[in-house]
Image: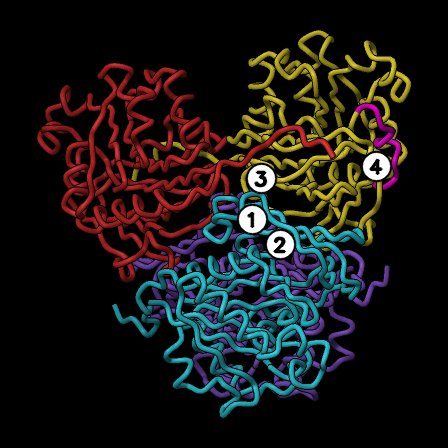
Chain colours: A yellow, B cyan, C purple, D red
Amino acid sequence: MTRVTVWAEYRQERSDPAVGAVYPDGIHAVIADGLRDAGREARTASLDEADQGLSDATLAQTDVLIWWGHVAHGDVDDAAVERVRARVLDGMGLIVLHSGHHSKIFRRLMGTSCDLNWREAGERERIWVVDPVHPIAEGLGEGFMIDAEEMYGEHFDIPAPDRLVLISWFAGGEVFRSGCCYERGRGRIFYFRPGHETHPTYHHPGVRRVIANAVAWAAGPMGDRPERRHRPL
Amino acid sequence: MTRVTVWAEYRQERSDPAVGAVYPDGIHAVIADGLRDAGREARTASLDEADQGLSDATLAQTDVLIWWGHVAHGDVDDAAVERVRARVLDGMGLIVLHSGHHSKIFRRLMGTSCDLNWREAGERERIWVVDPVHPIAEGLGEGFMIDAEEMYGEHFDIPAPDRLVLISWFAGGEVFRSGCCYERGRGRIFYFRPGHETHPTYHHPGVRRVIANAVAWAAGPMGDRPERRHRPL
Amino acid sequence: MTRVTVWAEYRQERSDPAVGAVYPDGIHAVIADGLRDAGREARTASLDEADQGLSDATLAQTDVLIWWGHVAHGDVDDAAVERVRARVLDGMGLIVLHSGHHSKIFRRLMGTSCDLNWREAGERERIWVVDPVHPIAEGLGEGFMIDAEEMYGEHFDIPAPDRLVLISWFAGGEVFRSGCCYERGRGRIFYFRPGHETHPTYHHPGVRRVIANAVAWAAGPMGDRPERRHRPL
Amino acid sequence: MTRVTVWAEYRQERSDPAVGAVYPDGIHAVIADGLRDAGREARTASLDEADQGLSDATLAQTDVLIWWGHVAHGDVDDAAVERVRARVLDGMGLIVLHSGHHSKIFRRLMGTSCDLNWREAGERERIWVVDPVHPIAEGLGEGFMIDAEEMYGEHFDIPAPDRLVLISWFAGGEVFRSGCCYERGRGRIFYFRPGHETHPTYHHPGVRRVIANAVAWAAGPMGDRPERRHRPL
């Protein structure tokens, strides 16, 4: 069975009552619950644990890593980022959520700034499927609606996605490439937009379905480890 | 100088007063005027002319063909479609506008149904640039707004664009991949969404800028004509 | 279990002793045998059967269609081509082999000429994996060698593949994009280069592995059938 | 006029007589000469100059940077790499040559290992054009041959190129994606394979043509600098 580790900063939940009220045990706990409800196994890890929750041992036992970060990107050690990057290139799946767009690991794997526009106005978001045959779109139909979310707007400074699966519409007038697939080395990477810490977004059945589908996709075949070396005639 | 032919059905303008009021000389005339205002040469052609306006002679003198069709897709001869297709594959640029998504030529070049969702409610459309370095986005900034347009919504049944430049937001809640680039054979193809016949969309400066930019892009290099044949050792 | 139909012209095998010697029961029979050896179910169909082997009933019971054609592309009815195309857009996988590059169905789905260079010199071909994490590359390692094959060389006039999995090297000096994935509508399409009728290529374990992998890939998820229609507010 | 800076390590030319014999004034000097012959302006810079030849002032006056590195990738300061990366994301073109595949800047922008297979056997290389309409292929016809070069073979661990323009064939049996285009931020990046230091490759007219074409392409439009910030309603 696919071994999933849900990693989060788990700081605002403890320091900010408005966040703690929505996610008392942490965002990672709710995401992991959603995966278990979908019949998957999931462990949690967080920034203030030993090795920042990202030890070699943890990563070695992780097939898909889910990443939620926001206010503490700078506190993640470069060495931890490098451990995660090495595992992704060697085949571990990585699902980067919401404000993780600015995490060291996502920026490092993308090579770009990953900057975007934003607005915290608790506005309506509609998420549309633009690649209905992609495994991550399975069971979503045309998409779904979230009643209140933070807005993220284009331009989003990422490499053109290998596959663009979802586009968001916001009541305030913006659009956003919300579900983006990449393959880097032997690893599959999925960026998924929703999930501001003051909204109960990770309880939303559509959001949960996307994450569960993305876990299945990101755990997909990674082929043999290619040899790359001197090749005499 | 790039030789542009703006082709349109030019039927609703003559049969439907609501359309004729907006485009008394035809949609093609307004599009051609916009190009001339941008310093380009442009001729017009339409369905009820000799050879349906698509003779070999016309096509041979056309570097970029702009296509607007809606109610008469079925009246375009298959032979004319094949002439256009042959010219595109040999290097002529093609810009397909709005309801041209269902034209024989676009469907023939895409290979898919090109179906979509739609609604005529004269609602607000915002067009966002998601690939700001693409030549078609030049001078658009973040995008622009059209006060009243027909809605086109996903899922749009096209091959994944080689480059996705524009995404539309509609007040009614939908999104749409509005500016899509393709290369087929030696030809460049651009699909651009706006332009319902009852709205003055082709007078809009943003729309005009996109079309002028797309002409420049579609007239771009097409390389030598590759030889493909038996190759003895 | 995935229902595979292996379709071939099955003419040269009966008219040309040099071909009949290699494929006495037809190329389709050998391909189907290879799939059965890989634990798959496979039926065969051919051009001179009723409905050209491509009846609605056959297609309705086919999840993945494998296509081998060469000298009789022009004999395939346009109506049969349209039936196949409709099924592909509705989700049937399609694997087009070798000289099928010039089949009506492949050209129709690609929109381009699909022309290429060629040479029948029975030369060595090496097939290299350039996308080792793609499911079609599973178990191939770096690739494999075919002792004697027809040469196909660039430029191959196809749309840029959605995924390029394999590149061929030929002893005579050419290269070729040999394994190309496309998604069109709900269907997955794979073009695979090898398989000239005078060589025992479809007995080769590497070739058989690619075809079996491609069947698994092409039978993959196709999502719900999107609705595309008028959408009132 | 496009301002080009050709940067090279310029070490083996001074320390290794076999290299110095081929490039007595440095590889960068020969590349710059080739650009001047093509009617372009070009300056040179190298690793042992002040600021490693990559000062903010130099980069600010550079529209396209050409990079050749091999034995001293590790000696390039991280700060210099970051300066180059920032300029690329802000619109400077970057052309990475040959062994530059392992440079810090290329790996940083790609996010992957950029590993490959290699062999120094002075063997024949044929470079084939697979995207003849791309500006970088202009004037190349089907491609060209280099009599003796180092071999680079797949699998090359890069993100799938945004555009694949060239594929190499080697006499020893390998293939390689030799001309790869990327867009990152506002910048255009081209990786071009040939150029081992013991071969007179940068005197080859085909190689010179590719580099001159790539300069023109990489200097292409970069649009306005997008604003990405908080957007109140």
Q: Is residue A199 magenta?
A: yes
Q: Earlier in the sequence, mark 4 or mark 3?
A: 3
Q: In this view, does C108 lie to the left or right of D6?
A: right
Quickly name the residue at label 1.
C137
Q: In this view, does C186 lie to the left or right of D192?
A: right
Inter-mark Cα distance, 4 to 3? 22 Å
Within 10 Å of disc 1 (Cα), the crowding (few <14, some 14-19, many 20+) is many
Which contiguous range is marked in magenta?
A197-207
Inter-mark Cα distance, 3 to 2? 19 Å
Q: Residue C220, position in %: x, y?
A: 71, 55
Q: Which quadrant of the rendered structure holds the C terminus of chain A?
A: top left
Q: Residue D127, position in %: x, y?
A: 29, 52
Inter-mark Cα distance, 2 to 4? 30 Å
1 vs 4, front mark: 4
**Residue type, numbered disc 1:** Ala
**Residue type, numbered disc 2:** Asn
Residue at 67% from the left image edge and 76% from the top image edge: B21
The numbered disc on residue A183 is 3
Q: Is residue A175 left or right of residue C8?
A: right
Chain ID of residue with mark 1:
C
In this view of the protein, which residue sits in the foreground, A201 or B99?
Answer: B99
